[in-house]
Image (cartoon, rainbow, N blue to C red):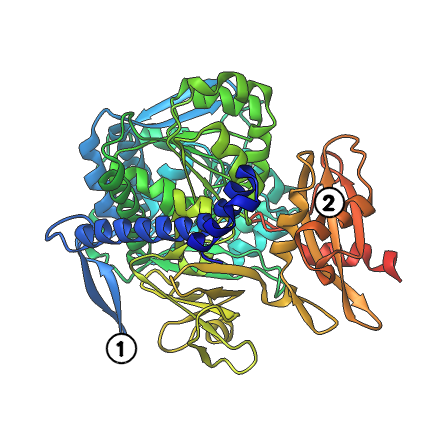
Amino acid sequence: MRPERLANYAPYVSVPLLAFLLARIVRPYLEKVKLALIDYVVGRALNKLTTKIGGNCEMGVVKRGEQEYRCFKNVPKHLGELFDLSRGFGQQECIAYIGPQGTERLSFEETISKAQAISAVLVNEFNVKPGDRVSILMSNIPEFPITFIATVSIGAIAVTQNAFWGGEEILFGLEDSASSVLIADRKRLERLASIGQLDTLVKNGLRVIVIDKHPADSTYHAGVYDFDVLMEKYKGAERPQNCKQIQPEDDACIMYTSGTTSGKPKGVVLSHQSFLQATYSFVAFRELLVTIRGPEKNPKVALITSPLFHASSFSSTFLLAFATGSKLVFLPRWNVDSAIDTFIQERVTWVGLMPAMLLDLLNSKRFHQEKEKFVLGNVGTGGSACPSELIARLHKMLPKLTQGSGWGLTETNAIGTAIGGPAYLAYPLSCGKALPIVDIKCVDIVSGNDINEPGVEGELCIRTICNMSRYWNREEDTRAIMDLEGWIRTGDIGKVDSSGYVFITDRLKDLVIRGGENISCVEVEDAIYKCRQDIVEVCVFGLPHERLGEQLCAAICLQKQADLTPKSIQDSVGKHLAKFKIPTQVFFRDAQSEPLPRGPTGKILKRQLRQKYSSSVL
């Protein structure tokens, strides 16, 4: 019924009821107008940035093989050039490491100077040449960016090994990449030694440098070099001039995927061009915010909460800092009280949080009491879909804060979509629109044919200059995921609406089909989070069912002792979703003693949950 026709009924209804009916009818139209206006303003601002001749975000076209891709025209030629340019920030603070023995601080000048010393070590001591692999195995400490900068600036390939790996996994990474040098902290090196392989590797030619942040003694394995001793030996050295040979399409880094679908991890090969284009996508995002909101009031300070061996924080935080002069703050491990201290003391303006971290903050009394001391301007969420309930709670607490999220894969250098501000509040289950240098499409899951109709689910595919060049030594696996036109099949099921917003509904192999009905696990998880605030984590998955094919199950992590029952969860979900989307089996877990199992990139391992609970429903 149209609003003007409701006026005819005014004498017969109460004023509050009439106001309620008008609000119910008018509000959706106002929301659509508001979002359309936001899209228009953002679109105009983005067009202005990408067409500004000589600007950071000016767009152009580049060829890779036979294919043409959109790109940012004015990026540095290679990563070494980016880091050389960052030296112009001089004594401006670059890194703050909040360690157990106090805070270690480095300026941009000091960071690049140390990196040049390690470059000299690699070339002069170990004869590292362009294309050689150097494995980096450490936690988030200042030596990680220093070592990465040193490696890629001489044309060698940085292999960012997973710091959570055990000895055998580390051995696999070294052998698979054929690394000639390993630079590791003492804790990770001991894992390799514990399986009796360190001495053998050294005898076979592997050069090992150990970083001993807090040594219990000065004993090292034979053939293992001390990072600080080598640094002191080459202090003040200039970087060898190998970087002059580096081309944009040269390999820069190998990042390993979790290997949850195919057993052994796969090495994703990413070029200098890939990293620079990904980094300048985030430069564009920052400049877009400034164009719309005006200059930032506080110096840019980013708190890194995810491991640096993840693609998610690499270009968006680490490399972005060297492109824009931002300060990077490293916290050894997540603890909500330590994080709050760091937010306040270091005056953090940007942070990326996993939903569990955000929940820690929202449930912290200190956060509520001291929120006025925060200068946070932007919070990004990732790792998994963030429940709309948490997004709403954070907005209520800090309404001026810009929240955002995005979607990408290691194979796309974490580039794909982005969403932020009012659009994110309106579409909390969307991962946003394609970034300027990204093309996205849906294909039929079975046939692989393009889906051209908006809102129809299929497998999402990404095409961008940031896409990997290949899997390391995995030609067959490369052909299985990437076609000749450069499209990568993501394995994510989703849809693109008529306005270009992308919605991920599930993983290809994790779709629950119950009695012929497709069920989005993300949608059900979001509904469960709305039940109670003491729900920490949720994972919805399918288990075999004799009659329906699959039944819907939910594993729920609770804080301490919560008085929830499976029926209370089912009743609550039933208030929000259709009956066939209500989980038939609910399993409770203690958040402290039995958190949900996760892979190295932070994704929940549904396969392990299926194995654990399959016998419970027979």
Question: Compared to 415, does 67 lie above or below?
Answer: below
Closest to the observer, 418 or 422: 422
Q: Amino acid at mark 1?
A: Glu
Q: Residue at x 22, y 41 (%)?
A: 291
Residue occupying image coordinates x 56% and y 35%: 357
Q: Is residue 242 visible?
A: no
* Residue that badge 2 annotates: 556
Q: Residue at x 73, y 46 (%)?
A: 572
Q: Is residue 267 above or below residue 23?
A: below
- Pick the front one: 611 or 154: 611
* Residue depth check, mark 2 versus mark 1: number of the one nearer the observer: 2
Tell me which numbered mark, 2 or 1, is placed earlier along the sequence: 1
Instruction: Using the rendered view, name the quadrant where residue 262 is placed.
Output: bottom right
- The quarter of the picture where the C terminus appears is bottom right
Can you give x and y, in whole percent of width and height, for residue 16 in the image?
A: 55, 37
Badge 2 crowding class, 10 Å Cα cut-off, few under 14, some 14 to 19, many 20 or more, is: many
The image shows residue 153 at horizontal and vertical percentages of 28, 47
- CB within 8 Å, label 2 to label 1: no
* Amino acid bearing label 2: Ile
Q: In this view of the protein, which residue sits in the foreground, 123 or 269?
A: 269
